[in-house]
Image (cartoon, rainbow, N blue to C red):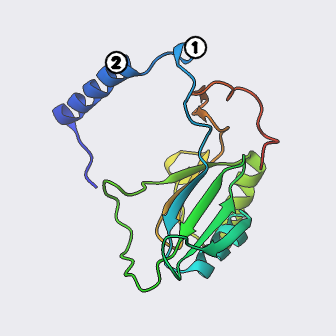
Amino acid sequence: MPQPEGPELEVIRSRRAELRAKYLHPLDERPASTARGLHHMALICRDVEDTIRFYQDVLGFPLVELVENRDYRGSSHFFFDIGNRNLLGFFDFPGHDHPDFAETVGNVQHIAISVGEEQFAAAKKRFDEMGMDYLGPDRGVDNSLYFRDPNGTGLELYCERVGVFEGDVLVRGADRDDSASTT
């Protein structure tokens, strides 16, 4: 996708600065969220078994439930434990066409999942051994692995604590060590 340049880029950057000044409050002045956290994100998959094998066997996220979708007969609804009591869910919709992924409004650009240094290194090694395509270190981003799952969904394994972005604490409590918090 073409990136803005010159005067167009400066207008975009200026608008972002205006929005930051207007809406982004200092951490100690922000109210607490009204939510308890992300229960699950539900994505659509092409093939249940391919998706289970990828998330469980390649990424190491245990399958914790597999049931029939309560809203669509014959459809499966299943969940993976992605740590910190967060779930990643999927549906399949048998009989429906599933077009290839397209990066567009209303779609997921990527899902960033926090991992520790040991898990990050193990995933990178496993991806290399499998010949799996990924981006990140090739662009000078040493703490991220960007790749696609079998359904085309963009994922990032991010070697950073939950609630922290590039070393900056974004939410209260994120400055505590959460390396032991895996479920």
Q: Amino acid at mark 2?
A: Lys
Q: Which residue is mark 1?
A: 28
Provide residue 24's location: percent of width, then percent of height: 43, 21
Residue 87: mark in rendering: none
Provide residue 93's location: percent of width, then percent of height: 46, 78
Provide residue 9's location: percent of width, then percent of height: 24, 34
User: Going 34% across and 55% down the picture, which residue do you hit?
Assistant: 106
User: Going 43% across and 56% down the picture, which residue do you hit?
Assistant: 108
Q: Amino acid at mark 1?
A: Asp
169 lies above or below 43: above
Residue 22: mark in rendering: 2
Residue 33 lies in what quarter of the image? top right
Q: Residue furthest top?
A: 29
The image shows a total of numbered marks equal to 2
> Do tag 2 and tag 1 residues touch (Cβ < 8 Å)?
no
Q: Residue furthest left?
A: 7
155 lies above or below 38: below
Report the front residue among 104 and 79. 79
